[in-house]
Image: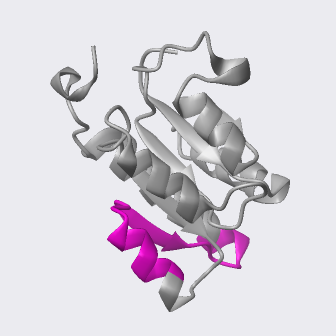
C-alpha cells in the first residue's frame, strides 16, 4: 500500500460509512483499509493468513480501533500491537462508544495514543472524525523509517 493510509478496525457498518463520509467530506482522501474483527486485524498487521503476502513493514499512518469487536476485543488487539516490535510505536486511536472508566484506563495503560468516545449525534461524529483525520494525517509526525523492522 505504501504511503499514508488509515486502518479502521470497526464491526459496525454504519460507523464505518459515517467515518468514511466524514473524511471524504473534509477532503481527507487517504486510502483506508477496513477490518471487521480483532483476529482479522492481527492477521493484517502481522501479515498472516489471507494477508501473508502483505509487506509487514507497511504500517498505517493511524489505526482507528473500536473496543467492542467480535472474536478478539479492541483492548486485546491493542495489547498485542504494543507487544510486537514492528507495531509497538504505530499510532493507535481508540474510537468507541464505550466511556467506561476501566476501558479508558486500560487503553492508556497499554499505550493507546488517544481515546475518543464516538458522539451519538452524526454531525458531532463527522466533526470528531474531521479533526482526528486532520491531526493524524496532516499535523502529526509519525515514526520514521528508522523505527521500522528491516
Residue 84: in magenta span: no
Residue 29 shows in this picture: no
Measured as percent of width and height from the top left, residue 6 is found at 52, 37
Task: Please identify the quarter of the rendering in which residue 129 is found.
Answer: bottom right
Q: Furthest residue to the bottom?
A: 101
> Left or right: 142 with respect to 51?
left
Residue 23 vs residue 117, the one in the foreground: 117
Residue stretch rendered in magenta on the structure: 103-124
Name the residue at 59% across, 39% down: 42
Residue 114: in magenta span: yes
* Quadrant housing the C terminus: top left
Whether 40 is drawn above or below 115: the answer is above
Whether 126 is drawn above or below 106: the answer is above
Q: Furthest residue to the top?
A: 53
Residue 61 vs residue 135, the one in the foreground: 61
Measured as percent of width and height from the top left, residue 1 is found at 52, 15
Name the residue at 56% across, 59% down: 76
Name the residue at 16% across, 23% down: 146
Q: How many marks?
A: 0
Whether 116 is drawn above or below 131: the answer is below
Which color scheme does this rendered protein use? Answer: one colour
Residue 73 vs residue 22, the one in the foreground: 73
> Left or right: 143 with respect to 8?
left
Measured as percent of width and height from the top left, residue 87 is found at 38, 38
Task: Please identify the quarter of the rendering in which residue 67 is found.
Answer: bottom right
> Left or right: 21 with respect to 137?
right
Residue 6 shows in this picture: yes
> Left or right: 110 with respect to 31?
left
Measured as percent of width and height from the top left, residue 95 is found at 56, 64
Q: Furthest residue to the left?
A: 146
Whether 92 is drawn above or below 126: the answer is above
Amino acid at each position: 500500500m505504501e504511503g499514508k493510509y488509515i486502518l479502521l478496525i470497526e464491526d459496525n457498518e454504519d460507523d464505518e460509512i459515517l467515518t468514511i463520509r466524514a473524511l471524504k467530506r473534509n477532503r481527507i482522501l487517504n486510502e483506508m483499509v477496513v477490518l471487521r474483527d480483532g483476529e482479522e486485524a492481527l492477521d493484517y498487521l502481522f501479515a498472516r493468513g489471507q494477508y501473508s503476502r502483505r509487506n509487514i513493514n507497511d504500517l498505517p499512518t493511524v489505526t482507528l480501533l473500536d473496543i467492542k469487536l467480535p472474536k478478539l476485543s479492541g483492548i486485546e488487539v491493542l495489547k498485542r500491537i504494543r507487544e510486537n516490535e514492528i507495531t509497538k510505536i504505530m499510532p493507535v486511536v481508540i474510537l468507541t462508544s464505550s466511556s467506561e472508566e476501566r476501558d479508558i484506563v486500560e487503553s492508556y495503560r497499554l499505550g493507546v495514543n488517544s481515546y475518543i468516545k464516538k458522539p451519538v449525534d452524526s454531525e458531532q461524529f463527522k466533526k470528531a472524525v474531521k479533526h482526528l483525520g486532520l491531526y493524524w494525517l496532516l499535523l502529526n509526525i509519525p515514526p520514521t523509517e528508522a523505527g521500522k523492522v528491516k
